[in-house]
Image (cartoon, coloured by chain):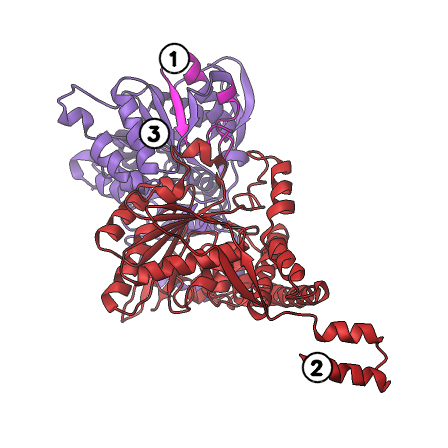
Amino acid sequence: MKKMLTAAVSRVLSGVTQKPASRVLVASCKYSNNATFEIKKCDLYRLEEGPPVTTVLTREDGLKYYKMMQTIRRMELKADQLYKQKFIRGFCHLCDGQEACCVGLEAGINPTDHVITSYRAHGLCYTRGLTVRSILSELTGRRGGCAKGKGGSMHMYAKNFYGGNGIVGAQGPLGAGIALACKYKGNNEVCLTLYGDGAANQGQISEAYNMAALWNLPCIFICENNRYGMGTSVERAAASTDYYKRGNFIPGLRVDGMDILCVREATKFAADYCRSGKGPMLMELLTYRYHGHSMSDPGISYRTREEIQSVRSKSDPIMLLKDKMVNNKLASVEELKEIDAEVRKEIDDAAQFAMTDPEPPLEELGHHIYSSNPPFDIRGANQWIKFQSIS
Amino acid sequence: MAAVAASAGWLLRLRAAGADGPWRRLCGAGLPRGFLQSASAYGAAAQRRQVAHFTFQPDPEPVEYGQTQKMNLFQAVTSALDNSLAKDPTAVIFGEDVAFGGVFRCTVGLRDKYGKDRVFNTPLCEQGIVGFGIGIAVTGATAIAEIQFADYIFPAFDQIVNEAAKYRYRSGDLFNCGSLTIRSPWGCVGHGALYHSQSPEAFFAHCPGIKVVVPRSPFQAKGLLLSCIEDKNPCIFFEPKILYRAAVEQVPVEPYNIPLSQAEVIREGSDVTLVAWGTQVHVIREVAAMAQEKLGVSCEVIDLRTILPWDVDTVCKSVIKTGRLLVSHEAPLTGGFASEISSTVQIPHISNVI
């Protein structure tokens, strides 16, 4: 630090630089390497102690999280635009507002851990390693998409990421099964099984809780509570809206899902708990989605614009992280703006690709139905069209 | 267009084979392999975005039920539900998001009119919704449950098949859940893909004890839905979702009933019988018109309306007259309901066809 200062001062005095002296001095000690933050204490259920209430955020991590969240935000907004231009058809469920959940979860686990979620999955697809290009072109149904254009919005998969599931709640028992495989293989991995506040009322989620607890599976059940199950608010759908307690015999945490550091610490805590063989844990992330349930839902017939605006101005996850970083000298506003510009460019390039990449060839429509040795024929939409099914 | 062209093409080959002779071949099963072409030969452009083509053909305005109003399918459903709730004080409507009007606007205004005790949202639990509905029905109240998409009916499959269908039988008629009606949007819509397009009527056709009904139009929907609600057996009413807005007709404002288990011959003909239900009826109607115009083939078009128990007599009588049968449906081919119809029609003592 001192060396840099001296060098800077001498540069100024030698008259080489055009910058005014004060600015050079400020520039060289502008950023801290890290800062300590206090985070909200999580509500606990059946737990003696919870995640730590302070955490250290390094500048490097902060910039990484910011970029990831901004990428997800811009990607979702671009998907909105492409949907309205009819490049994306079918159903499209956007997760803008919930970025801190996906990025925070990823920050708390290893790439070798497993994740499974519902249909509001684009953010997790990105954090699990898919490129924006492959996500957007899957949305537009092109061959560059991660599911070769045949899956669409709800069916995107990656290594250690099991989708992307359309049927509400169906991924609960699947996640418990993946956790069983982790335990059986003894590789110290955990499975994050995400579902929403609506799915929490599905019977099969309770079945998954029971199996996970009975067999001590390393499964972290995560309820992304964005207050509305499609058009029904949580108060009108659930006898108990304390979703973190709904696991009954499974210990639970209620986490502020708009604060990425809170999510990260809670995830690390839950993952350590599961890895130590103590069985499953339930995390409820309190979050919010700005868009409606899907692109067919305006999102304002069951909630007010004022409510959406209020969350956007007070608890937007990207804004919260930005304020933390700028106020603690982890980054400057200009630097973050540069990241914004980079992200915008990346998204625009990806969207361009997604709009121009060709669709998968029609011959592939029948592939991957069965795993079979000899290819067989399958009938198309009318009896004179047949597709070869090869796997 | 593809579907229409396909059916018309089939008829062409039929004609070429000799329309006079007693050629009793059924759609699909017996066609020689040579008729099939590979997908790429057919042409990608022709395939794309045309398999959901149909033109809704409204029926003439009904005169026997009093004043009519222009309604589309979802409005006809709302009207039927409105009539039911007005007539039957025990009737309740429940399902996911029905309170604000439902995702397809089938229940708009009903909560305001009849109160939140009678039109209410359930949590997201199909098995729970149907099980709960069976419970209401067993006590004698009228339960009208909504499953948001037919694709989501499978968690409730056990409740429907094992509980609802067999209640009367296993209790020796002491109890029944006949006042249960399950309504669900059904069928392809063009952009629904895996989980918003399914036509599961064949799964339920395999289960005695329930009734399965699919209307083709707003007028049919209101009459059939009212019949389902009043029928003393648990009924599943599948509403073709692509017709919710696309189908507009004059529909009577007052309640009326269309009998269940009665197929309707909507076009008389002498050369071939075409059977369909739901949206496909309109495709088949178009095919019949094309066949008459271009091939001189006279087609008899039957809308099956009730899938279970289905009107064997009407279909067989028609096949005896024409000697040929073509069944067209949206659901997958293998094990689809067409296989039931085609095999029944071939039973000698039932139809004299063979």
Q: Residue at x 26, y 52 (%)?
A: A212
Chain identifier of the red chain: A
**Which kind of residue does numbered mark 2 sit on?**
Met
Question: Magenta residues?
Answer: B83-112
Q: Which residue is drawn at 14% across and 24% down?
A: B171
Graded by Cα atoms within 10 Å as few (under 14), some (14 to 19) or many (20 or more), the crowding at tag 2 reads few
The residue tagged with tag 3: helix, strand or loop? Answer: loop
Does B194 appear above or below B311? below
* Observer able to see residue A163: no
Question: Which quarter of the image is occupied by the C terminus of chain B?
Answer: top left
Q: Residue at x 37, y 57 (%)?
A: A270
Does A262 appear above or below B94? below
Graded by Cα atoms within 10 Å as few (under 14), some (14 to 19) or many (20 or more), the crowding at tag 1 reads few
Q: Answer with mark 3 or mark 1, whichever residue precedes in sequence.
A: 1
Question: Colour in which chain B is shown?
Answer: purple
- Where in the figure is residue B107, as x and y percent of width and height? 48, 27
Which numbered tag is attached to residue B89?
Answer: 1
Q: Name the residue under label 2.
A: A4
- The reply to the same-chain question for discs 2 and 1 is no
Q: Which chain carries label 1?
A: B
The residue tagged with tag 1: helix, strand or loop? Answer: loop
The number of callouts visible is 3
